[in-house]
Image (cartoon, rainbow, N blue to C red):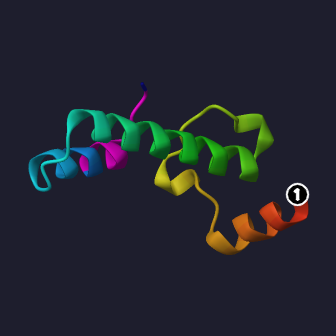
């Protein structure tokens, strides 16, 4: 699974500092990657399936407006 460096750092924290089980960490990682893909697709449908870098994510106010338009 493609991991963004920030996601990987969070998962490493859950393992080393919080002692979460490997199954839980895999689940969190999959959820975070899927959420990043959703945010990317919501802001730019042509980018669906990619994991954006933090700089590529739209500002919250733009994302909110785009999501509201789709409801």
- State the image coordinates of residue 68 (x, y, percent, origin top left): 83, 67
With 44 as the anchor, is 56 left or right in this view? left
For the N terminus, the image quarter is top left
- State the image coordinates of residue 66 (x, y, percent, origin top left): 81, 62
With 11 as the anchor, is 3 left or right in this view? right
Which residue does the image show at 22% across and 34% down from the upper left? 22
- The kind of secondary structure element at disc 1 is helix
Which SS type dominates the magenta stretch?
Answer: helix
With 47 as the anchor, is 8 left or right in this view? left
Q: Which range is magenta?
A: 2-9
The vertical placement of 65 against 70, above or below, is below
Q: Toward the viewer: 17 or 2?
A: 17
- State the image coordinates of residue 28 (x, y, percent, origin top left): 38, 44
Q: Toward the viewer: 23 or 52?
A: 23
Which residue does the image show at 12% across and 49% down from the upper left? 19
Residue 37 on the magenta span: no
> Hey, which residue is sitting farthest bottom in the picture?
61
Which residue does the image show at 30% across and 41% down from the upper left? 24
Instruction: Tell me the residue that label 1 is attached to.
Output: 70
């Amino acid at each position: 699974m493609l991991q963004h460096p920030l996601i990987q750092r969070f998962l490493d924290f859950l393992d080393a500092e919080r002692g979460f089980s490997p199954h839980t960490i895999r689940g969190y990682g999959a959820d975070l990657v899927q959420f990043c893909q959703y945010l990317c697709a919501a802001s730019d449908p042509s980018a669906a399936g990619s994991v954006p870098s933090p700089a590529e994510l739209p500002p919250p106010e733009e994302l909110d407006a785009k999501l509201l338009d789709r409801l």
